[in-house]
Amino acid sequence: MKYLKILFSLVFLLVLITSCLSSKQAQSTAYPIAYSSKTSGNVDIYLTDTQGKAKIKVTTHANRDGYAAWSPDGKRIACYAYHDGRKTWSIHTLNADGSNRKRLTQAKNKWDNAPAWSPDGKKIAFARAYKSTEGAWTEELWVMNADGSEQKQIKSLAGGGPHFTPDGKLLFHSKTNTSEICIANIDGSNLTKLTNNNAEDWHPEVSPDGKQVAFMSDRDGNHEVYVMDIDGANQKRLTFNKVRDSTPSWSPDGSKLIFTSQGHIYMMNKDGSSIKKIIPNAGQAAWLKINNK
């Protein structure tokens, strides 16, 4: 009887753990778009469905939370948050339901932002910006383990907005002032420039199939959403507004994009057609792409 009780307890515990993991997976699948909003009076991260109807608030940090990034399995979210009266920005991670929040970076008076998960979920890349002791604006790219350990600057690269490709390369934009979209190995080697103009090209995100890159650019007067092939060919403008359009993110099947415009989140087909507003008073949206490998 004693052994049967132990066996029963172990089985019950296994079922409970499996149920909890399934619940988190179901939540992220049902609410696959993460975004930032000031709806509650403070900028927090929310989750919503693809229609923007049902919404769940997942952060309650006293200061701003933003630039949410999904882990490949949909169980964790990385973001940045303000500290020290906005003088310090740090990278945090949390479960998809808002639990188990962890602060990963602690560099005082540095702006750590734009976290991005590697395809295997083991690493997080992020951007760091600050004024040097000489007063020069400095933009660095860093990488760390997903638990915050082994933080390393990618010293041969400078810029922001990192994003991983499906094969583990790093997309990013070079330093501000005529910044370009670039791609390199995670160690900084094999750097290739994908855009070449006198504009600001920012926030690249690769399509799920790894063949295209969506990004924002002010090359035509103000920031609009563009798309190009992964090698920089066939650059095409998708939005045509007199206001800033920014932070595009691909749907899991690569057929649609969401982006921010005038403080709202819009959805469109990947060719720029059928634009519609789905989330009011929101920005910095990220669409979950589950990696089942």
Image (spheres, helix red, strand yellow):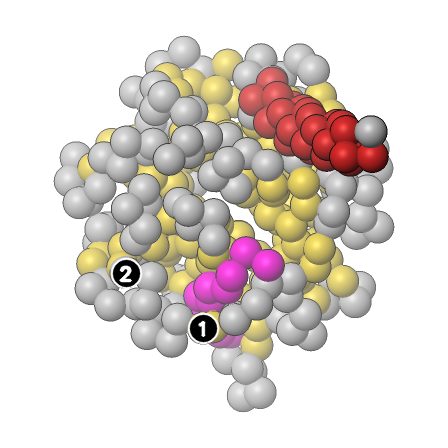
Mark 1 surroundings within 10 Å by alpha-carbon count, few (fewer than 14), some (14 through 19), many (20 or more): some
Q: Residue 6's x, y, as percent?
A: 78, 35
Mark 2: which amino acid? Asn
Instruction: Mark yes or no: residue 187 visible.
Output: yes
- Classify residue 250 by image quadrant: top left
Residue 101 in the image, given as x and y percentages of width and height: 73, 49
Helix, strand or loop for the magenta stretch, by majority: strand
Residue 134 percent across, percent down from the top left: 54, 88
Q: Tell me how far mark 1 sits from mark 2, CA to CA.
A: 13 Å
* Kind of residue indicated by mark 1: Gln
Q: What residue sits 72% from the left and 67% below the top?
A: 87
Q: Position of residue 39 (x, y in %)?
A: 78, 30
Give the labeled residue for mark 1: 153
- Which residue extends farthest front? 1
Q: Which of the 4 image quarters holds residue 129?
A: bottom right
Q: Secondary structure at mark 1?
A: strand
Q: Is residue 157 left or right of residue 123?
A: left
Give the residue displayed 50% in from the left and 64% down from the top: 144
Which image quadrant: the C terminus? top left
Q: Is residue 156 above or below residue 277?
A: below
Give the answer, above or below, for where 158 lies relative to 118. below
Between 204 and 95, the one nearer to me in the picture = 95
Of the pair 292 and 56, the residue shown nearer to us: 292
Q: Residues within 10 Å of mark 2 (few under 14, many from 20)?
A: some
Q: Can you see residue 240?
A: no
Q: Is residue 54 above or below residue 132?
A: above
Residue at 51 percent across and 61 percent down: it is 145
Q: Which residue is mark 2?
A: 185
Closer to us: 16 or 6: 6
Q: Tell me which segment is drawn in magenta.
A: 137-147
